[in-house]
């Protein structure tokens, strides 16, 4: 995988170690163009519920979700500051936050954290990027689907704390495989295209007007 980017991340050197990477797979790290997408459903927790969580000492927090190769990670930072972009967000294990919630809220499920899913693969394809940050969602859009808000910045994984979870070699390999085999389906994995009888006849070299004309004696 060849990386084209205006910034550096912690796994970039892996490509140079192996001669620059496979030129057939290009990862262009740039601003996200599709910052609002709609899909039938989204497995990420409802942000309205997540933002109602607070710590045992009642410090307000701000939440987002980092998606890497269709796997989600919880991002947390202190609320109430005038942060720019993704400043101060850190990947956080929700189990260590000692989060509290209002009694009338059902607690969100954290089992999906770090686990790739077909749902987030679909979202990655709609966004057009293998790495991005979800900053909000509306799971009850007027048309019955989910509207997902995406931050326009391509996140720097080093700044978010990803090196503590995934090594540079593993991250590079995951993204290279995702870009080359998963995010953009191979023609071999797509369902076969149905060909009409007319097209089959033409492909075989016959003339539809002459070859099958009824001849009279």
Image (cartoon, rainbow, N blue to C red):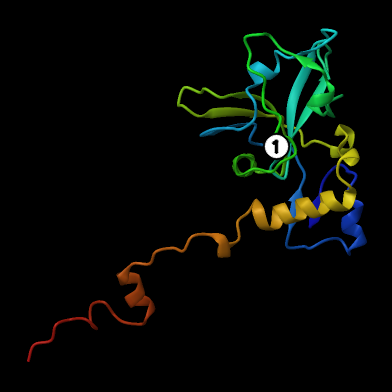
Look at the image and tell me whether residue 50 can be seen: yes
- Judged left or right of residue 37, residue 78 is right
Residue 135 rendering spot, x and y as whole percentages: 70, 25
Q: Residue at x 30, y 71 (%)?
A: 198
Residue 127, position in %: x, y? 64, 39
Side of 144 relative to 146 (left or right): left
Query: Observer-nearest residue: 108 or 73?
Result: 108
In the image, taking residue 142 as reference, residue 36 lies left or right, namely right
Quadrant that contains the N terminus: bottom right
The residue that disc 1 covers is: 32
> Looking at the image, which residue sits at the far left?
217
Residue 46, how many percent across, how many down?
Answer: 62, 22
Quadrant position of residue 83: top right
- Looking at the picture, tell me which residue is in the foreground, 24 or 53: 53
Is residue 85 among the parts visible in the rendering?
A: no
State which quarter of the image contains the C terminus.
Answer: bottom left
Query: Looking at the picture, does residue 186 appear above or below residue 164?
Result: below
Q: Secondary structure at mark 1?
A: loop
Name the residue at 84% across, 43% down.
Answer: 6
Q: Residue at x 87, y 24 (%)?
A: 88
Give the image quarter of residue 136: top right
Q: Is residue 133 above or below residue 185?
A: above
Picture quarter containing residue 94? top right
Q: Residue 182 location, x and y as percent?
A: 65, 53
Q: Residue at x 83, y 52 (%)?
A: 172
């Amino acid at each position: 995988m060849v990386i084209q980017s205006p910034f550096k991340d912690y796994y970039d050197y892996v490509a140079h170690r192996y001669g620059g990477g496979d030129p057939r797979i290009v990862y262009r790290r740039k601003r996200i163009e599709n910052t609002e997408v709609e899909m039938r459903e989204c497995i990420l927790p409802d942000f309205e519920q997540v933002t109602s969580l607070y710590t045992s000492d009642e410090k307000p927090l701000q939440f987002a979700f980092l998606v890497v190769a269709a796997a989600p990670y919880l991002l947390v930072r202190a609320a109430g500051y005038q942060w720019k972009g993704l400043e101060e967000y850190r990947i956080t294990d929700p189990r260590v936050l000692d989060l509290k919630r209002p009694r009338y809220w059902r607690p969100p499920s954290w089992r999906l954290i770090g686990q790739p899913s077909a749902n987030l693969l679909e979202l990655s394809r709609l966004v057009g990027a293998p790495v991005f940050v979800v900053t909000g969602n509306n799971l009850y859009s007027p048309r019955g689907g989910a509207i997902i808000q995406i931050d326009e910045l391509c996140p720097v994984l080093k700044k978010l704390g990803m090196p503590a979870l995934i090594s540079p070699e593993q991250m590079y390999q995951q993204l290279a495989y995702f870009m080359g085999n998963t995010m953009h389906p191979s023609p071999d994995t797509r369902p076969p295209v149905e060909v009409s009888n007319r097209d089959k006849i033409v492909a075989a070299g016959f003339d539809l007007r002459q070859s099958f004309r009824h001849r009279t004696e």
